[in-house]
Image (tube, helix red, strand yellow):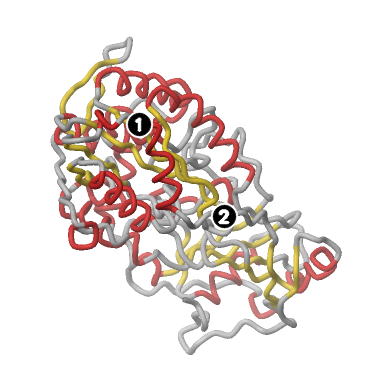
Amino acid sequence: MKPVKVAIDGKDNIKIPKMLRIKQHFKNEEVTNYEQILENDIKKIKDEFLNGKKIAITVGSRGITDIDQIIKSLVEILLKKGASPFIVPAMGSHGGATIEGQLEVLREYNITEEYLGVPIKASMDVVEIGALEDGTPIFCDQIAFKSDGIIVANKIKPHTDFKSDYESGLLKMMGIGLGNHKGASTLHSKGFGSFPELIPKVGSVFLKKAPILFGVAIIENAYDKILHLEIVPKDLIFEREKVFLNMAKENIAKILLSEVDVLIVEEIGKNISGSGMDANVTGRPGSGLNQGFDATPIKKIIVLGVSKKSHGNGVGIGMADLTTTKCVNQIDFEAMYTNSLTATILNPSKIPMTVENDQEAILAAIKTCNNINFNQAKIVKIKNTLELHEIEVSESYIDEVKNRDEFEILSKPYVLEFDDKGDLTGKE
């Protein structure tokens, strides 16, 4: 993108306030003994379903803490049981909807044949395993379907585009993840408004027609650590996933402040959230289905970059109000557009107002906030919507944070520094 020269009227009269680093306190329970938990839970599964069986283990594109260690522990347990496990990418259209793209996503999470000691079998081919009442076909990855059993391993979390009893989790992994590009595209064509009914219906078909063996449910806490890990027998997936989703919602990280004038987001990405930046934090779902998103009110959002692990997929940029030429130049439009076309929602891939550097973006955001004191703007700066335990806030929040137990002040106020290009220094 070429340089953008924008005249921001009155910018000399706008003073970017001093910032201070604070800590937000959330519940902090976690588990680390993954192998021990899985060893104990595998007793729920009869040996006859494991011994001598070729078993597919799903791994998706969501960033999950220690996913490589969890999957390796599971693989080693299955090998001891006499099974022949292998990995299948289950990420719908992510990774550019190509085999190599999806393998690259797995490599970023250290999910490799060398590390795990078992094959990774990637394919975009699918088989039709059933249909909905209206005739909509349901697809499953061909390699996984032909296995003796499928283990659906996934993180259970609040979805970023709709709310229901079943959101992002084991059931969604079946229809959307294992459906590969064709299945994900077919189901997304129904629209996110249909997902509260669609996801359980598609899950029911998978549980009846596909060789689903069991699920591995992973729930994270607000600090991006593993809160809970559990093997879920096939017949308990519907029951337990409801429980896990409530657990995840109670432990999700959020901005705990009362209101925000300007939110500065250093990076967005598919490894951070399916929508690039989590609507449970911003209150801005790309689907436009706003009901149920209980987030701190935010007037303006600035996005400054795309994470390296997102491989240029800048989906979510469209939910910002401002960005920079540097950020736009990090976007792989083919990957981003493929993702949005599959999801059938285009807003997350729209490019917001783009200015030349970080400093201009902040000044423009403050300038366009109505009915505020420009020199006392309430600004919050975060790395991304996943890491919210330590954030930066402007001086105008001091009275609020010093009087609430959820906050801890970590620094004295300081001036944000910019380099000779007008970009923030110290960004990761």
Nearest the camera: 43 or 157? 43
Q: Position of residue 384 (x, y in %)?
A: 51, 62
Apparent side of residue 21 relative to residue 277 in the rendered image (left or right): right
The residue that appears at 50% across and 25% down in the rendered structure is: 239
The kind of residue on which mark 1 rests is: Ile
Q: Do tag 1 and tag 2 residues touch (Cβ < 8 Å)?
A: no
Q: On screen, 22 above or below 60?
A: below
Q: On screen, 82 above or below 187?
A: below
What's the distance in space between the residues labelled 1 and 2, CA to CA? Answer: 25 Å
Mark 1, Cα crowd under 10 Å, few <14 / some 14-19 / many 20+, is: some
Among the 4 quarters of the image, the one containing residue 28: bottom right
Q: Element at badge 2?
A: loop
The kind of residue on which mark 2 rests is: Glu
Apparent side of residue 381 relative to residue 275 in the rendered image (left or right): right
What's the mark number on residue 45?
1
Q: Position of residue 339 (x, y in %)?
A: 31, 45
Q: Nearer the viewer, mark 1 or mark 2?
A: 1
N-terminal of the pair, mark 1 or mark 2, is: 2
Q: Element at badge 1?
A: loop
Q: Which residue is mark 2?
A: 30
Q: Position of residue 380 (x, y in %)?
A: 65, 65
Counting labels gives 2
The residue that appears at 78% across and 67% down in the rendered structure is: 397
What's the mark number on residue 8?
none
The residue that appears at 32% across and 62% down in the rendered structure is: 331
The residue that appears at 54% across and 32% down in the rendered structure is: 163
Nearest the camera: 26 or 286? 26
Quarter containing the N terminus: bottom left
Nearest the camera: 210 or 395? 210
Among the 4 quarters of the image, the one containing residue 356: bottom left
